[in-house]
Amino acid sequence: MRREHVSHASSGLPVGRGLLYLIVAGTTWGTAGAVASLVYRASDLGPVALSFWRCAAGLMVLLAVRLVRPRARTAVPEPLGRRALRVGASGIALAVFQTAYFAAVRSTGLAVATVVTLGAGPVLVALGARLVLGERLGRGGTVAVTGALAGLGVLTLGGADASVRPLGVLLGLLSAAGCCVMTLITRAAGAESSGTSVAVFAVTSLCLLPLALAEGLLPHTARPALLLGLLAYLATVPTALAYGLYFAAAAVVRSTTVSVIMLLEPVSAAGLAVVLFGERLTPAVLLGTLLMLGAVAGLAVTETRVPA
């Protein structure tokens, strides 16, 4: 039986369809950073408040979808306590992932923030999968980790002309760590249902609410229609749609493969940063980017050599 027709025992989702879900999610995620940059230009909304509104509005969209769509159930029921722990941990990881990323965008720019976050992600996931799930890193994976760390070093030390700030890089790494935890939890559980995204976004919204209130929940803007349109897009396409597809696919696709496919996001986001916002990629940033993408390619090659 070919791999694309194989279904995961817990969720029943074919692996081939899961890969398609990840491609769509990664591509749409690539627009989130660009939208965040536009929100910062149109208002005084901070990264925590922006992350809260993204999650809260995305939660409302997901709840509305559940009212008109039959609920899908997992083939193997998950114990309630285990599910509560998984959803809680995933919600916290998502809060860290999104908020740190938006803060990195504001600190060091869209292109660099996205490259650092999504470039470091596959490395952290590969290491975490080896420790938690027993997935072997191998010689190729070790070379990939070294290349990614070298790329991060070049971005941090050699990108002064491109407004690469150490704080922005650290925030990007923190965001990557949150994404890593979320991916490993979902894969380790091997279970997904239509309520997973709803529950995770509810936890994330509750975690972010007090911090958003402290930062300033309601924005001041001279262009309210533009701001509402940006927030509506952020809540629907790269949030409700993309994360719904992500949680479904991450339960059936290997962790390293998930992180590699998600690198569609920095490719599209970096392109948007250069084309729409005029961000410059200096030779140092280009070299760091190539080193990190080379590391990702090494992880992809390693992944193809590991039995499913």
Image (cartoon, grey):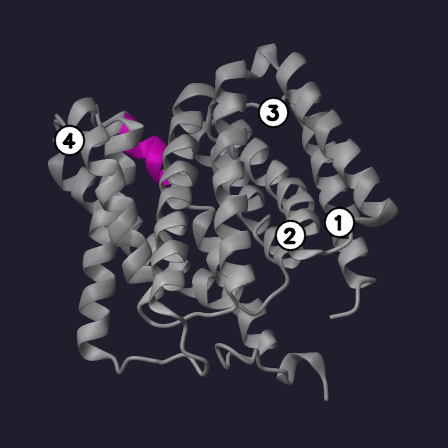
**If the image is split into quadrants, where does the C terminus sit?**
bottom right
Q: Is residue 6 magenta?
A: no
Residue shown at the point (68%, 43%) measured from the top left = 127
Give the number of the disc on residue 217: 4
Pick out the residue farthest to the right.
139
Secondary structure beneath dot 3 equals: loop
For label 3, the residue is 281
Q: Nearer the viewer, residue 33 or 65?
A: 65
Secondary structure beneath dot 2 equals: helix
Give the answer, above or below, for where 171 lies relative to 191: above
Q: Earlier in the sequence, mark 1 or mark 2?
A: 2
Tell me the quarter of the picture where residue 244 sits. bottom left
For label 2, the residue is 260
Q: Nearer the viewer, residue 130 or 183?
A: 130
Secondary structure beneath dot 1 equals: helix
Give the answer, above or below, for where 154 lies relative to 53: above
Of badges 3 and 1, nearer the viewer stands 1
